[in-house]
Amino acid sequence: MSTGSNRLPSFTLAIAIAACFAPLASADITAPQEETLEEFTEDAWTGKKIPDDERKFIEISAAAQNAVRNGKDETRIRNARKEALTQAFPKTRFERWAGILEHAPDDGGDGYIALHISIAPNIMLKTDLNIKPGSLIHKAASTLPYGTKVEISGEFVRSGRGQDYFEESSLTTSGSLTDPAWKVVVDGFKALD
């Protein structure tokens, strides 16, 4: 959880995000409007209050989504998003983020599952197929229906390819910007419903 000294007011963060996208020129990107962010970070998406760092993460991802919708250059947007994430998240750890369980697929054989947690419209956190049968997380997640509001803690996987600051698993640049699926390792999980 953030401390008061690490908190940036939403308006200040929007300016910081816009500054990261500055090489695109001011007309090339529009930071999400405050009203839009409120609707999915405060109550309408999960119905739960979310930590400040989760809100920052959503704001950065949403700014990139908005820029793509406005027809801006995808490579430049992706680079700007990477820079914004680099500045806002010096550590990979996240605590008590709220989301909606979208999918917990298994391979049909050994019982391991992967978690797909939506933290905002078209912004996903997902694990590899590494949640071990019998583990506390497996027990907590495997019986939940999709659509359950959950709280998760863990670590982002750093990008080894250098395209993103954190590993993003989409196959195309367009998909990585419009529907990012960020790879995480989860070590805390509970249902909120």
Image (spheres, rainbow, N blue to C red):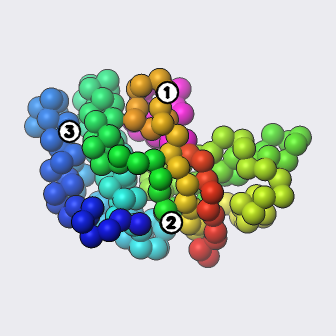
Q: From the viewer's perspective, is residue 154 above or below residue 165? A: below
* Residue 88 percent across, percent down from the top left: 30, 48
- Please give the label number shown on residue 96: 2
Q: Which residues are magenta?
A: 169-183
Q: Are marks 1 and 2 in contact (CB under 8 Å)?
A: no
Q: Earlier in the sequence, mark 1 or mark 3?
A: 3
Mark 3, residue position: 20
Q: Count all numbered tags in the image, as a single digit.
A: 3
Q: Is residue 57 left or right of residue 153?
A: left
Marks 1 and 3, how far apart at CA: 22 Å
| Quarter in which the C terminus is drawn | bottom right
Residue 72, image x, y percentages? 24, 29
In this view of the protein, can residue 147 be seen by the observer? no
Mark 2: give few (<14), some (14-19) or many (20+) Cα within 10 Å.
Answer: some
Q: Is residue 46 magenta?
A: no
SS for dot 3: helix
* In front: label 1 or label 3: 1
Label 1 and label 2: CA atoms lie apart by: 26 Å
Residue 124: where, in percent of width, then height? 51, 48
Report if the CB atoms under discs 2 and 3 are less than 8 Å apart. Answer: no
Nearest to the observer: residue 24 or residue 128 = 128
CA gap between label 2 and label 3 equals 27 Å
Q: On the image, numbered disc 1 is attached to which residue? A: 160
Q: Is residue 100 above or below residue 90?
A: below
**Tag 3 or tag 2, which sits nearer the N-term?**
3
Residue 71 to residue 88: above or below? above
The secondary structure type at the circle numbered 2 is: strand
Q: Is residue 18 left or right of residue 158?
A: left
Residue at 50% from the left image edge and 66% from the top image edge: 96
Kind of residue at badge 3: Cys
